[in-house]
Amino acid sequence: MNLRRLAAVARKETLHLIRDWRSLTLALAIPLILILLYGYALTLDLRQVPTVVWDQSKTSTSRELLSLFQNSPSFSIRGYYDSFTGLQKELDSGRAMIALVIPADFANKVQAAKPVKIQIIGDGSDANTSRLSMNYAAAVAGLFARTVAAEQMQLKGRGELKPPVEMKERSWYNPDLRSQNVLIPGIIALVMIVVAAMLTSTTIAREWETGTMEQLISTPLRAPELIFGKVVPYFVIGMTDVVMAVLMGKYIFAVPIVGSTLLLFAMSALFLIGALFFGMTLSITLKSQVLANQIAIVAGFLPTLLLSGFVFAIENMPLPLQLITYIVPARYFIAILRGIYLKGIGLEILWADALFLGIYSLFMIIRANRAFKFKLE
Amino acid sequence: MQPNTTTPENLPAIEADGLSKTFGEVKAVDRLTLQVYPGEIFGLVGPDGAGKSTSLRMLASIMDPSSGSARIAGCDVSREAAKVKEHLAYMSQQFGLYRDLTVQENIDFYADLYGVTQKGRKARIEELLDFSHMRPFVNRRAGDLSGGMKQKLQLACALIHTPKVLLLDEPTNGVDPLSRRDFWRILHRLRQDRVSILLTTAYLDEAERCDRVGLINQGRIIAVGTPEEIKRLMQGRILTIRSNEARKILAILQGRLSTISANVFGDTVHLVCRDIEETEKLARQVIQEAGYPVNQIQEAPPTLEDVFVSVLGHDGSHPTRKPLRQQKQAFASHAATASREIAVEVQHLTRRFDSFIAVDDMSFQVQRGQIFGFLGPNGAGKSTTIRMLCGLLRPSSGNGTVAGFNIRTETEEIKLRIGYMSQKFSLYEDLTVEENIDFYGGIYGLSGNRLDLRRDWAVEMAGLTEHRKSLTAVLSGGWKQRLALACAILHEPPIVFLDEPTSGVDPLSRRRFWDLIYSMADQGITVFVTTHYMEEAEYCDRIALIYGGKMIAAGSPLELKTRSMQDEIIDLRCPDPQALAEPLRLLPGVRDAALFGSGLHIVTADAEAARKEINRFLQENSIAEATLATILPSMEDVFVSLIEEVDRRNLSADQPGDRP
Amino acid sequence: MLRRIQRMLIKEFLQMLRDPRMRVVIFGVPVIQMTIMAFALTTDVMNIRTAVLDMDKTPASRELIESFTAGNYFRISSYLQSDRELSGVLDRGDVRAVLQIPSGFGKDIHSERTATFQLITDGTDSNSTAIALGYAGMIVSEYSDARQMDRLARKGITTKPVQIETVSRAWFNPNQESRFYYVPSLIATMLFIFSLMLTSIGIVREKEIGTIEQVMVTPIRSLEFILGKTIPYMITGYISMTIMLCVAFVVFDVHVRGSLPFLYAVTGIYLVGNMGLALIISGSASTQQQALLTSFLVLMPSVMLSGFMFPLNNMPDPVRYATLFNPMRWYLEILRGIVMKDVGLAVLWPAITAQAGLSLTFLIVAAARFKKTLS
């Protein structure tokens, strides 16, 4: 491989990028928006679940229960209705997610310490959210029951009861369970697959489509020089995006890096190379910008978003899918990112993930070079 | 670059041995065998789709041959591709440079690819910029250059490493005569430096300048030799009749004379016949009866184009002239008596792009049924004007009508009445030939029986009967061009705009294009055409010459040749004319000397004085076999001299005279 | 006019479907995507790998451990012997939680003191952790209540605890299976991706190759051209949706509860809006790459802020207001309404109005801009 020719290709590709300021801006704006979206707007935590109530009891006891709901950050009572149809309308229209039905004999039964049933109706059309909020609601009801029991005990003159068991919760690595601490590191992977695979997936195809490839083939340029040269500027953009993500994470969203920043960048570079050559391979084999790009989205972006553990924990997936995630490189990269960011661990633990990333990148480099026939058909 | 490994002079630098290429069932190139020696220019000519580009690509080692072998500078193209590429420069037919990079950046990029050292590079780039006259444009983006400049830039990029072998695929396609002259000047310099040049071309006057020519048809070389040798293939002798009514003369002569063939070349009718005296007598008689003016009747040596037409014209592979009759019927729906109605009229038409004035205060009229030629160098504003007339572009100021409709306000009406063929090939490459025709037919509102008829007509007219179901992408450049024309006139519009319809099309198809254009004009269809083939300009009823966005001359070809041209032209036939051009230009009284076909045209204000000087010069250099004649200028002479006159005026008015 | 449009359609279909790889992308990919996603996307947490560090080793501590493993929530995967092993198992990610019971736990329970233990969780997946902690809380309070009962019983007090039972019912999706939820979401997403990207690229490509110039000198009106360019993608969108609905029915047993014609009609509004957006994008882009990146820039926030994966309620107010201008948000609401809730115009009219308003706006902007692009 001749480094000078490689550098020439890299320089040319950089000029294309600079000339096409719009693509360049987009390459930097997309990560920015992703980071802001995940940093500010997107969270899976339940907050302010819109709740409607049919309080058939209308007693101070039932109001006490409802005030527990009202005070919980998870729920927000949006309205009271006196009929089933009222609740139904709210759930149908999606204005409410949860409906509580408190029976008429609620207060009496509670006073008499008889079992009583309250009904929680969730909007199952959003299964995840409804299940979570129904669990939360049950927990709130349980809390109410215990409070009442303790009060009753006290009333019976037994004095204050100490709870026999108390659980202390400690969450390591992320004591406040901030979702930003978890999402921001994951975004680095997402940003890189988007920028790297999307940008490179069009680059070789474009040379074929505009007819410049024919001229290139006639020069002493070798295929690997072209491939590696083309990757260089995109690598720079990708790393710029990483730096941007890290800085924004640190200064805007206050996500600290516990581990080694150097290792973080090194691992990002490794993953980036894999992603770049993945895009290259698509561009080389498909020779069409549209097709290469669609595949880059379907085979690159979506798995990184969904099957990497970024948003949805891998352990919660059914087994066949868990097996599929082993071939999603972002899975390893996200493990590494969270390891460095939150746990502060290094290669002594992450070596296996790093090794896989290395193999993946190498495989993609070889794949791209193998696939490239530097000839006209 | 590697001076130590020069090939011996007597060995061919390009050597093909039984080179073949098959695409599916089609044999694109069939056992091609040829040699090109150092310092030789070899021209490969043949009809569209004959396998010219494929041959070049295999020689450039960018496409693997199906069988056979080839050597470039002694290295095998398949096994030693890397070495081959070091010695080779290749210019693809398609513009292969990056439009978003500047001239300088493109050159630098190629210099790096070829590993030109920093030390030698600067001098080499300077040299290339000088000799391609590109220096004023180094910071311009390649995409903004005119067609001629683009080709020169591509050549400059290919030459950056002083190659031993140069392969050029239709390098002058779509390039105006001025730039073409520049281009050939460069090629001759390279030839003197012992570079082997193999080129393909659709301009047969260029082929005449080659040292040797190979005639290729259906993938097979059918003749190789010097232009003189090739011309000997010609059966019969040639009688030329020069007249301003050449086309009409041809029409009346056809069928009345027992000639082998009769064709029009510019303003001249060529009759190929066995008995020259008999034919001349008969011809004179017929023309006199008809009362057409004749400038000159004489026997002439055959040109390559004569050979091309006579050797390949009777070949079954090529569309014959028969369909002409059908066309007459096809256009009959629009047939009308030729009237003096105005079809196109513009007043003070101007179009600005930011600060750049592409079209500057242009006014003209085109009458119905006229063939109106629009000539001018690349970037003069021809295409911009046509786009405005077609309603694609709004004029910045000025006004105009097409078919009686305003080009500002009634573009939809105009579009119903025009056919337009753009310069850039613009059919869908991922559709087949028939699908393209169906698509355009459909959006022009054809359907059912009529669409069937027109489809058959178009396929036949484009000579693509065997390729109806082929994807357009696999057709050769000339074929695509024919298909584009067919699609543009499917709906038989009363006004047709053709932007360089014949660029890159072989001479035979070009003739058919023009036959078609004539038959359209005969039926009252107005044809608005741009071209870089100056002999085609002769076919037009009226010509407007535009330059720098302005119309600098207008009139019939005869008017232009006699009135607008102040200088006189001396035609010089001699061996190795290119070598003489430089010294002749320096003679007193000689304004310019340039290659013209296989000879030289010398421009002078005073022919008598100049002839004396030239004769003296020829004697001093003991060049005996030269003939001199003062002639009526050709269209190309007019074109070049008018433009140079404008340049001179601009220069004296202290304005930079660079042609954009 | 109809004939010209018809020709455009034929041409577009030929171009779109000539490449077999493209056919796979258009019709095959949505099916695969749906299959994977419907299984993958669940925030439910089960079988949390848990290590136990039991320094007490009494029947009480074992009972606690048992109560943790009784449900399906926690799964004990290892027993630790000392504190020192703790950081190792968490760092390596071997377990997500460690149940640490100090010595003296059993003694504290039997005396009147409060016995404490620790649940250490791995916060690197904050969402799963929060849910796990919720489960743990319930388990512990149950366990604690039982111990309280024991204590009181020892003192001779028998009391019934207050029992508030919650009866949870999920409407529209009684088993709360995610697949019911993801089928409509994925249809909306896939339609958005394909209609936006393919349409905008289709137009930009004609600009790039120069064919648009040839077409624009024909009598074709810009409206016809636009229709010809967009209708094929709308039809493809419909076909794609139909395929996805079929797969949903056959593979996942998810069927449309509401009216199918209504669903297809409302989808039309959505697709038309997407076409408008695609036209706006293609009007401003000059290369395919630009069109792709711009589409992606529009697409990503639209998907993320549609309520697909992230509940709209959780978003900060400004962002929530911004989602009002997100066509996919409305479509998703409509789609879920029709597919799962069987509601009609009476309930969905606000969303449909919003959707139609957005689509119309996009079209008007597109028409204004497209005229300009051509000249």
Image (cartoon, rainbow, N blue to C red):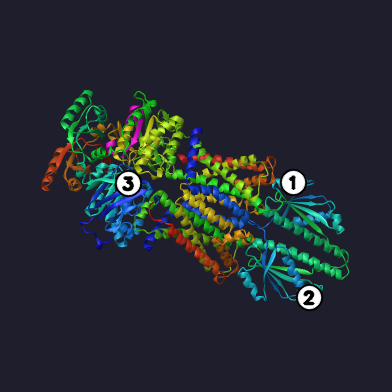
Q: Which residue is mark 3?
A: B51
Badge 1 marks a residue whose secondary structure is helix
Q: Is residue C84 left or right of residue A354?
A: right
Give the quarter of the image for residue B574: top left
Chain label for disc 1: A
Residue C225 vertical placement versus A186 (above, below): above
Q: Is residue B535 found inside the magenta-colored segment of the image?
A: yes
Badge 3 marks a residue whose secondary structure is loop
Residues in magenta? B518-536
Q: Are marks 3 and 1 in contact (CB under 8 Å)?
A: no
Residue B114 vertical placement versus B572 (above, below): below
Query: Hey, what amino acid is under mark 1?
Result: Gln
Whole-number angstrom distance, CA of label 1 to CA of label 2: 52 Å
For the N terminus of chain A, give its image quadrant. Answer: bottom left
Q: Is residue C54 left or right of residue A234?
A: right
Callout in the foreground (3, 1): 3
Disc 2: CA contacts within 10 A as few (<14), some (14-19) or many (>=20) = some
Q: Is residue C346 left or right of residue B544?
A: right
Query: Hey, what amino acid is under mark 2?
Result: Lys
| Marking on residue A88 | 1
Q: Which residue is mark 2?
A: C107
Disc 1: CA contacts within 10 A as few (<14), some (14-19) or many (>=20) = some
Q: Is residue C48 left or right of residue B416?
A: right
Give the quarter of the image for residue C98: bottom right
Q: x, y percentage for residue B491?
A: 41, 31
Whole-number angstrom distance, CA of label 3 to CA of label 2: 97 Å
